[in-house]
């Protein structure tokens, strides 16, 4: 199903040339920095443009308002997370249950940890800029990936891989988001990873088909 985006959150144009891409990347990075420094309520297009080293007029060539800018930041972040997980999971297809469960968790954690600052920065504005739709689309993409991996498992069979995949994606995403936004500094990556491995592997062992 195609993602329906509110027109208010759409960018004016997509960067095509290298220079345009560099400007948009600078605006995205500046947006994250401003969000971390002052929060979404105090974020303005002027602050972002100044931090990026461009004029407000240049910013408006690409984004009609701050909501469209932050929506695009979230979209790029989620696409990066999904692509990273997909890349890390390529070698898991056809693996054993232990290999798939462990590899999935490791891929989820690694992708999140690569972008900790962005995860913290986008937490506040997520609802206000239509981010929920983007999150749902990313979850659907992740669910399809996990379902395909479970279906390929060489030593274990499952009756409803799609439902299992939905639970795994929801559970892992929720745990990781809570860890990086609410408890960053108090939750160690290794400890979180160990607990998530045990959760996913235990769940899959309990829901596998019995011979």
Image (tube, rainbow, N blue to C red):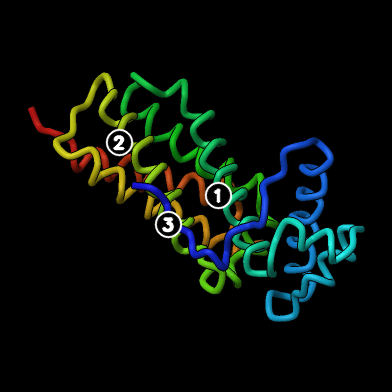
Q: Nearer the viewer, mark 3 or mark 2?
A: 3
* Residue 182 in sight in this render: no
Camera-nearest label, 1 or 2:
1
Give the class, few, some or many, for how many residues have Cα within 10 Å of label 2's Cα (few <14, many ≥20). Answer: some
Which of label 3 and label 1 is nearer to you?
3
Across and down, in percent, residue 69 comes to 67, 62
Q: Residues within 10 Å of mark 1 (few under 14, many from 20)?
A: many
Which of the marked residues, 3 or 1, is nearer the chain's N terminus? 3
Left or right of 31 in this view: 149 = left
State left or right for residue 208 relative to residue 180.
Answer: left
Based on the displayed image, in which of its 4 quarters is residue 55 positioned? bottom right
Q: Earlier in the sequence, mark 1 or mark 2?
A: 1
Q: Residue at x 30, y 48 (%)?
A: 166
**Residue at (74, 67) in percent of width and height:** 36
x and y percentages locating residue 42 in the rendered image: 75, 80
Question: What residue occupies the far left of the structure in this picture?
Answer: 211
Res 54 → quadrant: bottom right
SS assignment at label 3? loop
> Which residue sits at x=26%, y=40%?
204
Question: How dense is the environment of label 3, judged by Cα within 10 Å: few (below 14), some, or many (20 and up)?
Answer: few
Which sits in the foreground, 69 or 90?
A: 69
The x and y percentages for residue 108 are 50, 43
Q: Residue 119 placed where, x, y %?
A: 62, 58
Quarter the C terminus occupies? top left
Whether the residues at callouts 1 and 2 have beta carbons within 8 Å, the answer is no
Q: Which mark is residue 78?
A: 1
Q: Which mark is residue 147?
A: 2
Give the answer, above or below, for where 168 lies relative to 161: below
* Helix, strand or loop at mark 1: helix
Q: Label 3, on which residue?
A: 4
Q: Residue at x 41, y 42 (%)?
A: 142
Disc 1 to disc 2, how far (Cα)? Answer: 19 Å
């Amino acid at each position: 199903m195609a993602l329906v985006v509110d027109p208010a959150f759409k960018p004016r144009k997509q960067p095509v040339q290298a220079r345009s891409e560099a400007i948009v990347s600078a605006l995205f990075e500046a947006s994250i920095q401003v969000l971390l420094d002052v929060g979404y309520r105090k974020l303005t297009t002027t602050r972002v443009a100044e931090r990026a080293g461009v004029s407000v007029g240049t910013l408006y060539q690409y984004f009609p308002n701050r909501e469209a800018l932050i929506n695009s930041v979230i979209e790029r972040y989620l696409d990066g997370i999904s692509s990273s997980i997909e890349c890390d999971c390529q070698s898991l297809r056809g693996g054993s249950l232990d290999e798939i469960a462990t590899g999935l968790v490791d891929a989820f954690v690694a992708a999140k940890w690569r972008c900790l600052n962005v995860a913290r920065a986008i937490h506040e504005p997520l609802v206000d800029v239509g981010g929920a739709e983007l999150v749902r689309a990313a979850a659907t993409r992740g669910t399809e990936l996990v379902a395909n991996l479970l279906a390929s498992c060489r030593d274990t069979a499952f009756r409803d891989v799609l439902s299992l995949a939905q639970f795994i994606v929801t559970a892992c995403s929720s745990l990781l988001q809570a860890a990086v936004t609410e408890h960053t500094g108090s939750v160690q990556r290794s400890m979180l990873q160990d607990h998530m491995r045990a959760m996913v592997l235990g769940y899959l062992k309990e829901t596998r088909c019995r011979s």
